[in-house]
Image (tube, helix red, strand yellow):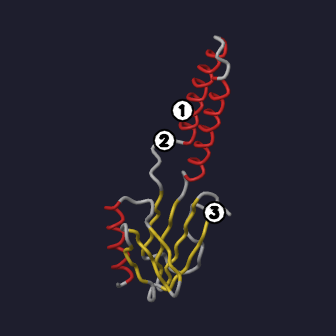
Amino acid sequence: MECPQQPFKVPGPVPEFSVLLKRNCSSSPAGLALVFACLAVVTLAIGAGFAVMGAWLVLPFAGLEALVLAGAYLIHARHAADYERIELSGRRLRIEVASGMQCLRYEMDSRCSRLNIARGARLMLRDRGTELEVGRHLDDTARARLADELKTRLGN
């Protein structure tokens, strides 16, 4: 299930608080694919060169290395667009988490929701038995700012 990259389509007032937290990707998917393709071509060319000189066993290992590079690229590409969206609108706290091919949406009552800072500076939102980690794409400083803002907004 794929989540749209736009705010929740819920009738009602405009959110009082809204934040979109995304991974920091410094290169485009096409640029990264080009880098991986160049690495694979160089590896296979070196393997072919050794095969021509009689060390043919190097070529299968070069092919294996190219496959591992392709796998690494696919794993990276699958999670490059991960994000978290947090919106507070009246008494409703909505959280949308996209990770890989999965998109989950949560809705909590802001009056009952509590933000706890767990071991390792992890931010945990709790509401009536539901526990959800937020801010996993942030560094420690930005996570602390998010925690302050959420605690102020939730009143805890």
Residue 27's disc number: 2
Residue 20 place in picture, x, y as percent = 47, 63
Quickly name the residue at label 3: 102
Q: Earlier in the sequence, mark 2 or mark 3?
A: 2
Q: CA distance from mark 1 to mark 3?
A: 27 Å
Place residue 71 in its image quadrant: top right
Place residue 17 in its image quadrant: bottom left
Q: Element type at marker 2?
A: loop
Q: Nearer the viewer, residue 44 or 102?
A: 44
Residue type at numbered disc 3: Gln
Q: Element type at marker 1?
A: helix
Q: Earlier in the sequence, mark 1 or mark 2?
A: 2
Q: CA distance from mark 2 to mark 3?
A: 23 Å
Residue type at numbered disc 1: Val
Quickly name the residue at label 1: 35
Q: Earlier in the sequence, mark 1 or mark 3?
A: 1
Q: Residues within 10 Å of mark 2 (few under 14, many from 20)?
A: few
Closest to the camera, between mark 2 and mark 3, is 3
Residue ID at (36%, 65%): 143
Residue at the extreme top: 53
Residue 74 place in picture, x, y as percent = 62, 45
Residue 26 place in picture, x, y as percent = 45, 44
Q: Quadrant of the N terminus?
A: bottom right
Q: CA distance from mark 1 to mark 2?
A: 10 Å
